[in-house]
Amino acid sequence: MQAHPSPKDRFVTVYGRKPVLEALADTALEVDKVVLADNAGGPAAREILHAAAQRGVAVQRATPHRVKVLAGNGRHDQGVLADVVAPRMRTLGSAVAGESGPVPRTILLLDGITTPANVGMILRTATAAGVDGIVVPRRGVATIDPLVVKASAGVAFHAPVLRCGTAEEAARTLRGAGYPLFGLAADAPRTLFSAKFPSRTAFVLGSETGGVGPEVRAQVSEWLAIPMAGGVESLNVASAAAVLCFDLVRRRHG
C-alpha cells in the first residue's frame, strides 16, 4: 500500500469543456477542483469559471502542458480538467487489509483491457451486481476518463474501484491476502456454473486480444469455462463479465 496515495486513487479526472461542465452541473457529484489552462479565454472559459463559482469549486490555473500531463490525454483535454471525488475508490492494499472500510468479498481484476467501452460497461455491470471491488490498475488498463465514464453511464464515479500499479501487483496482493484467483477460459474442464467459491474470491478478466497476461496467469488458482453453443468460441470481455457477475447474484439469492 502506498504511504501517500496518488490523486488517481481518490478522483476520477474528466477533461474537455463538455465533460467538465456536465460534472459541475451534476449536484450529486463532488468536484474537488478544476484546472484551467492559463491561456484559456473566451466564452467557454467564462462558462466554466461561472459554473465552478456557482458550485464553490476552486479553479487552478496551469500551463497548457501541465493540463495535458494531469489529464493524461494530449489531444482532447481542451485546456481544462476537473477532479471528481470518487467516494468508493480506494487502494487495493488498504481494502484487503480492512484499513479503509469493509474487506471486499468478491473482487474483479481487470488485466490488459484497453478498450474504454469495455472498462466502462464492466464497471456498470459489476456495480449493479453488487461486486465489492473492481481492480482497475493504473497501468495496462484503460484510464477511467470521459470515454469510460460515458460507457458506464456515469456509474464510474460511484463504482467500488480498487487501485494499484499493475495487474500483476494486484494478483500477488490478492493471493497474499488469501483470495483464490479464478480465470475464465473456453477450454477449462469445469464450468463457472458448477464451481464452488469461498466467501472471499477474486476473478480476473483478460484483454480483448491476448487474454490474461502470463504474469497474472501464473497466479490463477483455477480456470472456469462459460458453456457455449452454436459454434461460438468466446464472448466479448464485457459480456463475459456480465455473465460472471450475475451468476454471483444468482448464488447470493439462490
Image (spheres, rainbow, N blue to C red):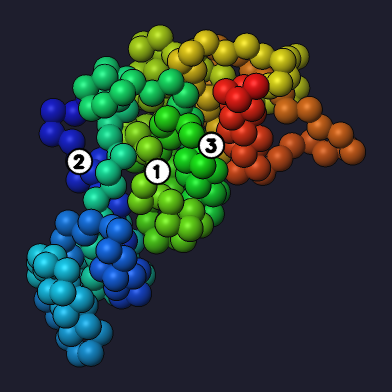
Q: Amino acid at mark 1?
A: Ala
Closer to the chain start, of discs 1 and 3, is: 3
Mark 1 or 2: in front is 1
Which quadrant of the rendered structure holds the N terminus?
top left
On screen, residue 68 above or below 98: below
Q: Secondary structure at mark 2?
A: loop
Seen at 65% across and 22% down, the residue is 254
Seen at 23% across and 62% down, the residue is 82
Seen at 81% across and 32% down, the residue is 228
Q: Amino acid at mark 3?
A: Ala
Q: In this orientation, which residue lies closer to the viewer: 25 or 241?
A: 25
In x, y percent, where is residue 65?
Answer: 19, 66
Q: Which mark is residue 159?
A: 1
Structural distance between the alpha carbons of marks 2 and 3: 28 Å
In x, y percent, where is residue 249?
Answer: 59, 29
Q: Which residue is mark 3?
A: 129
- Left or right for 152, reference 43: right
Q: Secondary structure at mark 1?
A: loop
Asked if residue 65 can be seen in this view, the reply is no
Q: Residue at the far front: name it.
A: 253
- Left or right for 10, reference 206: left
Q: Which residue is mark 2?
A: 6
In x, y percent, where is residue 88?
Answer: 31, 39
Residue 78 picture quarter: bottom left
Q: Amino acid at mark 2?
A: Ser
**Contact (CB < 8 A) between labels 1 and 2?**
no
